[in-house]
Amino acid sequence: MRKAKKEEPEEYEVEKIVNHRIAGRAKKRIEYFIKWKGYSSKDNTWEPSSAVYIVDYFYFFISNLFL
């Protein structure tokens, strides 16, 4: 019997971080409102920081908050 091949999760490219928020009542966490490259703004989604590899975009976003 052949084992089913594990599929890698699909990855999407971040175009920019549009916004951020603190979510959760008991356990606070940061979420980012992501604009996905190749998709319209209506497809933007809130994503937990743990689910998105956004290091470069994060620093760009944070630096622009204080301009």
Image (cartoon, grey):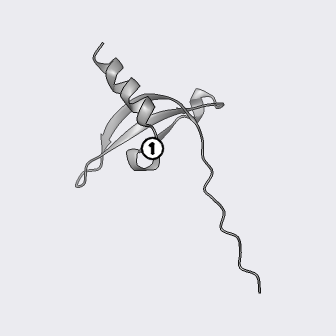
| Residue beneath the point at 61% across and 31% down | 37
Element type at mark 1: strand
How far across and down, in percent of the image, does residue 10 sit? Answer: 63, 51
Q: Does residue 25 appear to the left or right of 43 in the view shown? A: left
Q: Quadrant of residue 19?
A: top left
Instruction: List the single residue furthest toward the bottom.
Output: 1
Instruction: List the single residue furthest toward the left.
Output: 26
Q: Quadrant of residue 5?
A: bottom right
Instruction: List the single residue furthest toward the front.
Output: 56
Q: Does residue 29 appear to the left or right of 6 in the view shown? A: left
Other residues around mark 1 within 10 Å, as few (<14) / some (14–19) / many (≥20): some
Circle count: 1
| Residue beneath the point at 58% across and 31% down | 42
Measured along the vertical axis of the image, is residue 25 above or below residue 32?
below
Instruction: List the single residue furthest toward the right.
Output: 1
How far across and down, in percent of the image, does residue 43 sit? Answer: 59, 35
Q: Amino acid at mark 1?
A: Glu
Dividing the image into 4 quarters, which one contains the C terminus?
top left
How far across and down, in percent of the image, does residue 66 sit? Answer: 27, 17
Q: Does residue 23 appear to the left or right of 4 in the view shown? A: left
How far across and down, in percent of the image, does residue 38 sit? Answer: 66, 30
| Residue beneath the point at 65% across and 68% down | 6
Measured along the vertical axis of the image, is residue 36 above or below residue 7?
above
Q: Does residue 40 appear to the left or right of 61 in the view shown? A: right
Is residue 48 or residue 7 the one in the foreground? 7
Is residue 46 or residue 64 the one in the foreground? 64
Q: Quadrant of residue 1?
A: bottom right
Say which residue label 1 marks: 47
